[in-house]
Image: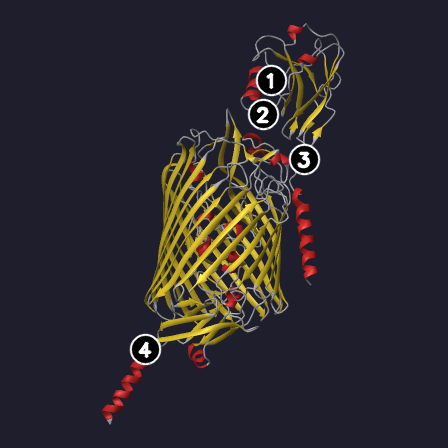
Amino acid sequence: MRKEILLSIVVLLSIFSACDQSGLNPNEYQEPGFSGSITVVGSIPPRDSVRDLRVVAVPYYPVDTTVADLIDKILNKQVIPFSESLSNNVAPNTTIQYQMFVKPKTYHYVAVAQLYGINVFQDWRVVGIYGYSPSTPTPAPVVVVEGQMTKNINITVNFYNPPPQPFKK
Amino acid sequence: MKVLFFHIVVVSLLVGQQPLSVSGRILSADDESPIAGASILVVNTTLGTSSDVEGKFFLKNIPPQRKQLQISAVGYRTVTVNISDIQSKGAVIHLYPSPVLTQAVVVTANKRPQSLEEIPVSMSIMDAQAFEQRNTIALDDALRYVPGVHFQQWQINIRASSGYSRGVGSRVSLLVDGVPLLAGDTGEIAFEAIPVFQIDRVEVLKGAGSTLYGSGALGGVVNVLTKEAEETPTVYWRVFSGVYSKPAFDQWKWTDSYRFFDGEFAGFSSRYNSLGVAFSINRLSDDGYRQNDWRKKYNGFLKLKYDLSPYQSLTFSSNVFSQYRAEFLWWKNFQNALRPADSSGITVTSLRFNNSLVYKHFVSDEFYYDVKAVHFRSNWYRDAPQNVRLDQSISDALVVDAQANWTLDDNNILTFGVTGNYNRVRANIFGTHDGQGTAFYVQDEYRFSPSLTAIVGVRHDIQAVRGAYTEEQTNPKLAVRYAVDENNTVRLSVGRGFRSPSIGELFTSTANTGSAAIVVPSVNLEPEHSWTYELSSTHVLSEYLQFDVALFHNDFYDLIEPNVFSDSLVKINFKNITQAEIEGFEVSMLTKMFNHSLSCDVHYNYNWAVDRNTGAFLRFRPRHIASVNALWTPPFCTVGADYRFISRIEHIDEQLVDLVPIPNGRQRVDIHVVDARIIFDVGEIGFPLRASLNVNNALGYNYNELIGNVSPPRHFVLSLEGVVR
């Protein structure tokens, strides 16, 4: 009888210790986000005209907005996430890999923005939009879900033939 | 000779009028083992006592015209015995085990003592043993095993009635000995302030209970009944110490040392002639398993019951609670789940006390009444290091309730009463406000036949908060109980419930307190209300097996929910935004085996909780809740294990996660928790000591009840307790 009790205790302790890493597990967790490549086509502007280059993910269509409004939403309200600066990797006919960790939601307008002047609150323009081409002018949405990295969000950038700007004059 | 005869007659009459005394022993009919904690009441008086660990009891000053004692104990069939009979039988009373708790006497359902099997609504009870065996430190720990109950950290949710709103408002009403105990400022339940070591039992009424209990009893009522004084001087004590397991993942490690908790409890209880005295003190210190999550708390409790006569009693209760703790709101992120998002070292100090006075008077066999008054003061302060005060609140809640029970005839019992309440709040985040209310209620319980009983009741409330609202609410109730036969009972009930917005929901403003998100006032809130429909039944299949089934449907209107929005800053207010429908069922199977030495209860609750406006599943509600409770009682020891399962919360407040923000706040899983314990009781061999080892979250399962908050890991608790008489 003692043997059975001892065996039961050993089995129970084994089961208990085996369960230690069940449930929430940070090792199995994938930070949500999206990734892809930026392909630069055509020639590139002088270095001092590409002061910064970032991917921004806007959860809505920024129709008829202003640069200042978008900057406010990026910096103050943190509702528009942006990537790290990619300007150092810009070269003619190159492909730049990028990855962004963002909150899981649908981003209706994912674009590459270029800082072309010295005023970081004003001198921005869009040089590439995910899903945009002259034949399909509607941007494609990027869906990010919890615990997953959405891949192949590839964007073409053409500095000298940019897509339509969403900004008011 | 005539003189002598006259004297004999007079003396006989006088002797006949002498108060009676009765003593005896209550044993289990199964195995002659003593039953501790059995309730012995002299019918239609305020007199009563409970049996000691040897099953013994003693009652005196019983009026000679009183003929009967009612004896009840959880797990046994209630009996009513003639006093003369037990005197002639040497006062040994045998109680027969019931496979279930149907025979327990409860008071919450209809504001009068009655057998659990007589009530027409769903109710669960937990007795003192359940608390002691689990080494319960806080009331909410034990309530997690009540069927249909779910917690979001400290916020109770009965049958999915509540979502989550941090610290403001509760859709469940908390009573202590029948008097409400909700904080005057936030209207929340302060579970930590309940003196758990003094709990005799807890009754959980499910569904709307506003017909008798007014505002707040929208989803249910939790009534905590405290212990009565022992007949002879008795000292209780308990010491316990525990340790948390180290974090399961290297990323979660934030300290190299083990984290401990410990506490002590000491109490005294005795009756001195007409005065019953019970008091206790306890202390708890907890290092916390998370960084900046420690706490220290102290609690003192006093209960004095004075029998003015066999028919009148006056009970004074006082409870003082003090807590000093660090503030852990949510994690830093998933990789640092045991570190707080805010590591600035904010602390919260609470000082709460409540005093109550209850006068009870049995005017006749047919009529008795009681008058209750309670004052609950809640002070809390939130401080940053260097004694920088961030928030503070001082609130008072005063409730006076007068209630009468009138047995019109053998089949008709009328319960009616009037109640009034006054709340006052002074706080930097709520402002200075007051509110008051009054209500009257009446309920008639009519027995058409021994098997068919119906209850009709209504309560009318007028509630007002200065500067916000004045509202009238009428809450009717209809309930029917039909006993098909001795073993099968069917119940049907319909009732309305409501909850007035708390001062916290109306006036909270954190614009100047440096909080992560700014809460703005919501003075236009309306009371929320609900209709509850329930069909339930109990089936006793044998002495060893019982099934309970309940189908329920609730319609909720104007539910108050937090609303997160963003203009120039992230803001939160409260709005009447949801019309909801919650329906589901609850099934319980209660078994006892091997001559009642092994019991096993299985419960399952399914909730379908839908927002009528959007069609979405309601936020912070689980769809499935299940539990299994097993208890084995061989000689000298008790072995128990509880398992509970709560399905993954399907919908949370995504805006709260994004805008506050709570990093990785969407992380959540199904909950599987096993709590196990072994208790050695050597009291039966004359040594008044009980030792127990509890292993809580024995599986070491990593889960979170609340977004951004990992629940406690596996922890071990060793406790010693004793009773000295």
Tags 2 and 3 on a common chain: yes
Cα gap from disc 3 to disc 4, whole angstroms: 77 Å
- Image spot of residue A59 (x, y percent): 63, 25
Residue drawn at 44 percent across, 45 percent down: B297
| Label 2 with label 3: CB-CB less than 8 Å | no
Q: Is residue B167 left or right of residue A1?
A: left
Label 2: element kind: loop
Chain bearing tag 4 is: B
Q: Check disc 2 and report the residue beneath it.
A: A79
| Label 4 with label 1: CB-CB less than 8 Å | no
Type of amino acid at the residue the image marks with label 3 = Asn
> Which quadrant of the rendered structure holds the N terminus of chain A?
bottom right
Indicate which disc residue A27 carries: 3
Q: Of marks 2 and 3, which one's residue comes earlier in the chain?
A: 3
Nearer mark to the viewer, of 1 and 2: 2
Indicate which disc residue B517 carries: none
Tags 4 and 2 on a common chain: no
| Label 3 with label 4: CB-CB less than 8 Å | no
Cα gap from disc 4 to disc 1, whole angstroms: 95 Å
Label 2 crowd (10 A; few <14 / some 14-19 / many >=20): some
Cα gap from disc 1 to disc 2, whole angstroms: 18 Å
Q: Of marks 3 and 1, which one's residue comes earlier in the chain?
A: 3
- Image spot of residue B704 (x, y percent): 59, 42
Q: Is residue B15 left or right of residue B158?
A: left
Q: Specify the farthest residue to the bottom.
A: B1
Cα gap from disc 3 to disc 1, whole angstroms: 43 Å
